């Protein structure tokens, strides 16, 4: 339990608070509409469906307020910078912004379903009450009409006996905006499934921008004021007595004709703040898009990996950060995240792009077809943005785990280490780094091996061979490659990378690796950083919990994962 609290305590506390607020809002508004005296006559028409429609609406307001905030990248970077004094645990929560965004979206989907079903029942009961199918009281309430065109007398919004649910849905503000909101939400959620996001990113990207229509409909949804409550009158309307004598309404002092009004629309008050913040976010992105980006160098590596060295005025980065790229010649709207592989000490920033979809394939083909010596296509850069890897130098010991192209943030870190040693930077507090790279094919090692060779030589010259321990794992090979390795097994350097550290074949034994790190660092705080698949993240996260010691004098592992 102590280990779990170390790694997940604050995260779980935040989730409990969020869920607690959702439950509180649901229960409070359910009781308000189910027991409130001002809705007594409304309940005679709608029954419990009134409360079941309004309680989810309150929860929807709260979550629609939250849904945009986790995707405001500049806001998160600002918060990350302001939390430097608050410790790494608080900053780690900002790296789970997309996870929280999805949780909030699931809650919106659930509450929308409940809200929609309840209102479908409400419309049916409004129509049945208009036809007098539920007795004299609902029938009389449905027949109340405005006497002086002040819209305070009627209770049933269904205008006539001939109205059907379909007509009501497409001829009222609440009905029409409700249909539009629901359709937009269904398209956004279904296109966000991982199988679509991975294989058809453009579909996900474009349909997700239906959020503009969603929020526009949301703001106007309550303007129809369909759900109405009773107003106080003079003399007061005695509900207890008058409900049994609807035929005497307006004829005796105890029973003046009841007055009703729709509730004031409140959704816009919940979402206006986040909408303004998000508009500012998009304006800032647009301004950055207009800034000129120059190519310093373009390199095409094996395994279809494109290296871009770019220069942008006023651009400042930190290790492990990422940027969003836009190429107008491919798409004016699409922006894709890429981790920078350069170090902050360099006067340019570098991005390595692996072909993994339509957008990257088109970009690589454009670059391959460029005339020699020419500049690349126009490109827009938004960023940089912070990630978990920024905190790597806050730990005295760090474990860096990259899978495939996921090595990119650690290239930035290792380059920065090289510069810090070269300049004898006294601010480098890290005393040990363990680096693991898992790849399926040998070509993927080639572009990164040069950096490791430089680091290997630098550490040896400075007598710091133990500072960096790196292990490369090849997870896919054939018999020809195995035979080649066996022939050259006695060489001093590896046949794949040319490094003194030989390549390992197969996957790491993480039990063994964590045990080794714990034994070599018996009283250290170890930061474990991953840029790789979710399955590997779950495995490493469990190992961090298992091998952490509750005793503050012994080894503790903190898990950090890159999220885009």
Image (cartoon, helix red, strand yellow):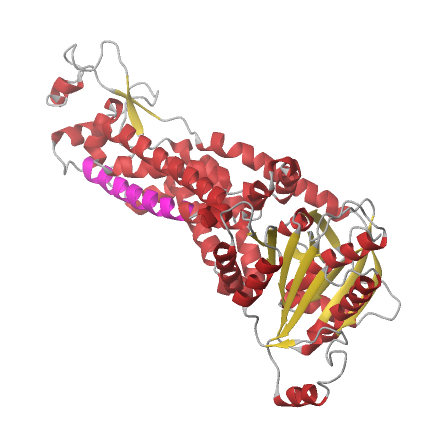
| Quarter occupied by residue 163 | top left
Residue visible at 77% across and 79% down in the picture? 492
* Residue 513 horizontal side relative to residue 146, left or right: right
On screen, residue 67 above or below 229: below
Residue 319 vs residue 73, the one in the foreground: 319
Q: Position of residue 368 (x, y in %)?
A: 78, 72
Q: Position of residue 29 (x, y in %)?
A: 32, 31
On screen, residue 328 above or below 138: below
**Numbered label tally:** 0
In magenta segment, residue 455: no
Residue 501 vs residue 224, the one in the foreground: 501
* Residue 141 horizontal side relative to residue 298, left or right: left
* Residue 397 horizontal side relative to residue 132, left or right: right
Residue visible at 85% across and 71% down in the picture? 371
In magenta segment, residue 115: yes
Per the rendered image, the range of residues in magenta is: 108-129
Residue visible at 46% across and 54% down in the picture? 189
Q: Position of residue 517 (x, y in %)?
A: 60, 60
Residue 303 vs residue 159, the one in the foreground: 303
Give the residue furthest to the right.
373
Quarter of the image where the C terminus is located: bottom right
Q: Position of residue 509 (x, y in %)?
A: 54, 70
Residue 199 visible in the current orientation: no
Residue 417 visible in the current orientation: yes
Residue visible at 56% across and 37% down in the picture? 275
Most common secondary structure along the magenta stretch: helix
| Quarter occupied by residue 54 | top left
On screen, residue 82 above or below 101: above
């Amino acid at each position: 339990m102590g280990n779990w609290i170390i790694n997940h305590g604050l995260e779980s506390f935040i989730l409990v608070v969020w869920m607690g607020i959702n439950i509180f809002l649901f229960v409070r508004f359910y009781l308000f509409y189910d027991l409130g005296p001002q809705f007594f006559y409304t309940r005679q028409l709608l029954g419990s469906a009134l409360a079941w429609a309004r309680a989810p609406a309150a929860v929807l307001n709260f979550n629609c307020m939250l849904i945009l905030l986790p995707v405001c990248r500049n806001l998160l970077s600002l918060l990350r910078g302001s939390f430097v004094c608050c410790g790494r645990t608080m900053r780690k929560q900002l790296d789970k912004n997309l996870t929280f965004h999805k949780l909030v979206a699931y809650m919106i989907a659930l509450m929308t379903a409940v809200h929609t079903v309840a209102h479908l029942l409400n419309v049916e009961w409004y129509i049945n009450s208009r036809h007098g199918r539920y007795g004299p009281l609902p029938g009389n309430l449905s027949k109340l009409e405005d006497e002086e065109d002040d819209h305070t007398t009627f209770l049933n919004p269904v205008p006539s006996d001939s109205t059907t649910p379909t007509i009501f849905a497409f001829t009222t503000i609440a009905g029409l905006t409700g249909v539009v909101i629901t359709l937009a939400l269904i398209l956004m959620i279904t296109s966000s499934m991982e199988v679509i996001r991975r294989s058809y990113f453009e579909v996900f990207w474009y349909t997700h921008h239906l959020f503009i229509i969603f929020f526009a409909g949301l703001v106007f949804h309550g303007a129809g004021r369909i759900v109405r409550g009773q107003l106080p009158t003079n003399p007061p309307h005695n509900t207890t007595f008058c409900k049994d004598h609807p035929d005497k309404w307006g004829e005796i002092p105890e029973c003046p004709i009841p007055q009703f009004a729709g509730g004031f629309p409140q959704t816009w008050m919940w979402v206006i703040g986040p909408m303004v913040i998000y508009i500012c976010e998009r304006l800032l992105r647009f301004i950055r898009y207009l800034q000129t980006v120059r190519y310093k160098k373009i390199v095409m590596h094996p395994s279809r990996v494109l290296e871009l060295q770019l220069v942008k005025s006023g651009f400042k980065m930190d290790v492990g950060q990422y940027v969003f790229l836009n190429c107008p010649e491919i798409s004016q709207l699409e922006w894709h995240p890429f981790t920078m592989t350069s170090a902050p000490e360099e006067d340019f920033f570098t991005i390595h792009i692996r072909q993994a979809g339509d957008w990257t394939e088109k970009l690589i083909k454009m670059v391959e077809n460029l005339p020699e010596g020419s500049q690349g296509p126009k490109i827009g850069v938004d960023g940089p943005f912070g990630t978990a890897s920024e905190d790597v130098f806050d730990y005295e010991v760090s474990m860096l785990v990259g899978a495939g192209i996921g090595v990119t943030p650690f290239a930035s870190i290792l380059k920065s280490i090289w510069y810090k040693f070269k300049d004898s930077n006294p601010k480098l507090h890290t005393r040990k780094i363990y680096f693991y790279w898992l790849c399926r094919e040998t070509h993927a090692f080639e572009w990164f091996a040069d950096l490791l060779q430089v680091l290997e030589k630098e550490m040896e010259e400075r007598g710091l061979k133990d500072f960096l321990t790196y292990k490369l794992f090849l997870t896919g090979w054939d018999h020809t490659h195995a035979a080649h390795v066996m022939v050259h097994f006695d060489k001093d350097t590896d046949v794949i990378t040319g490094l003194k550290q030989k390549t390992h074949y197969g996957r790491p034994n993480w039990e063994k690796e964590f045990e080794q790190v714990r034994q070599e660092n018996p009283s250290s705080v170890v930061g474990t950083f991953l840029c790789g698949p979710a399955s590997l993240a779950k495995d490493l996260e469990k190992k961090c919990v298992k091998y952490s010691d509750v005793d503050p004098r012994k080894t503790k592992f903190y898990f950090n994962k890159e999220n885009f």
